[in-house]
Image (cartoon, rainbow, N blue to C red):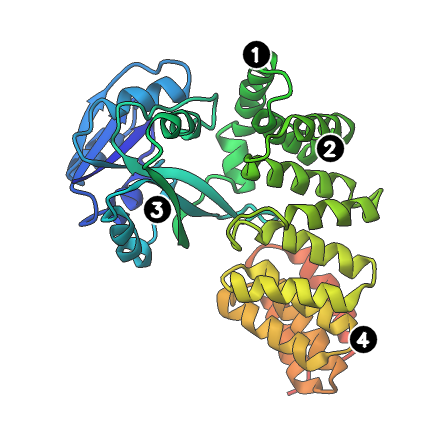
Amino acid sequence: MLSLSMIVRDEEQQLGACLESVKGFCDELVVVDTGSTDNTIAIAKDAGARVEEIEWPGDFTPARNKALEFVSGDWVLVLDADEQLVDSVKPALQALMAQPDVLVINLLRYEDGAVQSPYSSVSRLFRKHPAIQWSRAYHSMIDDSVEELLKSEPQWRVVDCAEPALFHTGYGPAELIAGNKANRLREAMEAELASKPGDPYACAKLGGLEVDQGNTTRGIALLEMGLEHCGAEQHRERYELLLHLGIAKSSSQPEEAESYYKRALEEPLSPQVLVGARLNLGALLLRLNKLAEATEVTAAVTRQAPEVLLGWYNLGLIQRKAGNIGGAIEAYENGLQLDPDSPELHQNLGAARLAGGNFEAARESFLMAIGLLLQQNRKADAEALARSAGELVNLNAA
């Protein structure tokens, strides 16, 4: 029996889609509400969930542990309201759960809006075992308790699901601002570091946040400290530390950044999780005019994660700079299959077609880009593109 376990508060905009995504897959739906004032509870009940109500304990870890007490399944799937289970992955998950020695299944989560690192791995599907508990501040996890459990019960296995399993919408810029997530993350990780100085996980999260917000000096210091304390088996933490160090140094010290990205790619993680380092390395190599290597690295992204739009966009830029106009056009066209409403892709496709001598096709691409910019209320950008493209092709031709 598989139980869904959730903690929610005022999630009426997203909860319905989340619960719909597990319909027919989970045998029991348990939603723990921590004080909603909107229609969250009604939506959960309408979807067939049992709703338990508790007071917010001040942090996700005790809330998730309390939620575990309410489920009765042999297996537990834990989701947030801004996540959805990918339908195509369900047979693979069922096959893994059927293996008698599997304890935890790590799930690949696609982070919509997290451009520089579109995939993460999360331990969200596991057997209900009394020793498995959530720990850590903010981004609570079961990893610490599982590590301890395996010392006394080594017969269990922790496995990775190779297919993307979760779609997460909570890390787009608008969501981060609306939910005040950055400030809450900072407070939680500062407290974590105060109690565990040098903790690699907290250093990775807080250091990455500092770099994102322009506090590069402190960010680098935190990331380097975390790297010094990172254990041999902490592959996810080391990867994140190295990735953020590469991002932090990409402008001022590109050679060091290149080294950090390449070290990150040596970690034994799934190809999808490594996409973030490959994307950043490819963009850096393009800037350094190492075009052959940039092509190799970025083409690997499009093979391993063809659903990641930025891979195709960057590959188009690299191919065009390398003089491979046909390759650039193909890359942009593949990108447009994912997002046909991207004015940037249409604009770059127009430039590539123009470089290849196809003036009529270039004109069509430029006009499409201009039209999309106007639809998106980006009038100044549309006018600028019309002026620059109009100097190259006749946009008024019949």
Foreground: disc 2 or disc 4: 2
How many C-alpha atoms fall within 10 Å of the one at disc 1: few (<14), some, or many (≥20)? few
Answer with mark 1 or mark 4, whichever residue precedes in sequence: 1
* Residue 329 as seen in the image, left or right of residue 337: right
Q: Is residue 314 in view from this perspective?
A: no
Q: Nearer the viewer, residue 65 or 44?
A: 65
Q: Relative to residue 49, is residue 101 drawn left or right?
A: right
Question: Where does label 4 land, which residue?
Answer: 391
Pointer 2 local density, CA inside 10 Å: few below 14, some 14–19, many at least 20: few
Residue at horizontal 54 percent and vertical 69 percent from the top: 336
Q: Which residue is mark 1?
A: 195
Task: Point out the tag, 2 or 4, that comes first from the N-terminus.
Answer: 2
Sequence-earlier tag: 1 or 2 = 1
Crowd tier of the residue under label 4, counting other residues whose Cα lies within 10 Å: few below 14, some 14–19, many 20 or above:
few
Q: Nearer the viewer, residue 9 or 85?
A: 85
Location of mark 3 (residue) = 84
Mark 1 element type: helix
Q: Quadrant of residue 242?
A: top right
Residue type, mark 3 in image = Gln
Image location (x, y in percent) of residue 243? 66, 42
